[in-house]
Image (tube, rainbow, N blue to C red):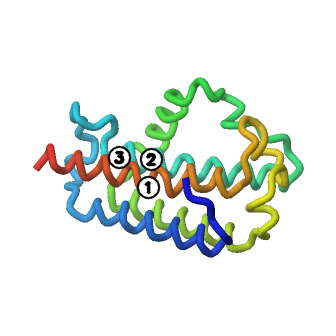
């Protein structure tokens, strides 16, 4: 996992990996967005919903903590050993959206993330324990939480969507 020198480097990496992931959907047919194949563990719709779900969830942790609320991660309804059920909730939340709508939502959410990160101080991003939600289940600096919920899945899902397209062409 990379270590970012500053917030600009993190934002640049998020934007770059998002764009590469998003471009893979240029030639995914709408009528195949929910096609499940044995070689890939998620459908195109599920990949988009997963990303939207996590980006939205992490932003909600930040918003809630800044509002003085106690944040339960990942959610009050799901524990860390119930992530499969949480993902199913993400899939249901974004079921019924077209790929065009999902892509638009993900673009906006990614932009929201980058704007949020740009407004954070270097201390908030790179020092341990500045936000309580960052130490609730893993004592990581915020940048690491942001990386594993944006850059890392954008990269891994880009590989998955490419594999999915290879087997559905």
Q: Residue at x 45, y 70 (%)?
A: 16
**Mark pair 2, 3: CA separation:** 6 Å
- The percent coordinates of residue 123 (x first, y second) are 81, 65
Most extreme residue toward the top is 81
**Which residue is identified by label 3?**
45
The residue carrying pointer 2 sits among few (fewer than 14), some (14 to 19) or many (20 or more) residues within 10 Å by Cα, namely many
Helix, strand, or loop for circle 2? Answer: helix
Helix, strand, or loop for circle 1? Answer: helix
- The percent coordinates of residue 51 (x first, y second) are 48, 50
**Mark pair 2, 1: CA separation:** 12 Å
In the image, residue 70 above or below residue 169: above
Helix, strand, or loop for circle 3? Answer: helix
| Residue 49 image label | 2
Q: Quadrant of residue 114 in the image?
A: bottom right
Would residue 131 appear left or right of 145 to someone viewing this image?
Answer: right
Residues 131 and 106: in front is 131
Check contact, mark 1 vs mark 3: CB within 8 A: no
- The percent coordinates of residue 89 (x first, y second) are 51, 35
Q: Residue at x 53, y 47 (%)?
A: 53
Q: Earlier in the sequence, mark 1 or mark 3?
A: 3
**Which residue is identified by label 1?**
154
């Amino acid at each position: 996992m990379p270590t970012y020198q500053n917030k600009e480097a993190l934002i640049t990496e998020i934007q770059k990996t998002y764009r590469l992931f998003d471009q893979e959907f240029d030639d995914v047919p709408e009528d195949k967005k929910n096609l499940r194949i044995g070689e890939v563990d998620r459908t195109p719709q599920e990949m988009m919903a997963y990303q939207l779900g996590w980006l939205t969830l992490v932003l909600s942790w930040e918003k809630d903590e800044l509002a003085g609320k106690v944040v339960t991660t990942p959610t009050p309804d799901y524990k860390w050993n119930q992530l499969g059920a949480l993902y199913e909730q993400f899939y249901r939340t974004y079921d019924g959206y077209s790929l065009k709508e999902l892509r638009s939502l993900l673009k906006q959410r990614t932009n929201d993330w980058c704007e949020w990160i740009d407004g954070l101080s270097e201390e908030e991003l790179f020092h341990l324990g500045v936000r309580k939600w960052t130490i609730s289940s893993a004592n990581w600096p915020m940048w690491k939480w942001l990386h594993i919920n944006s850059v890392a899945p954008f990269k891994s899902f880009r590989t998955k969507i490419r594999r999915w397209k290879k087997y559905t062409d």
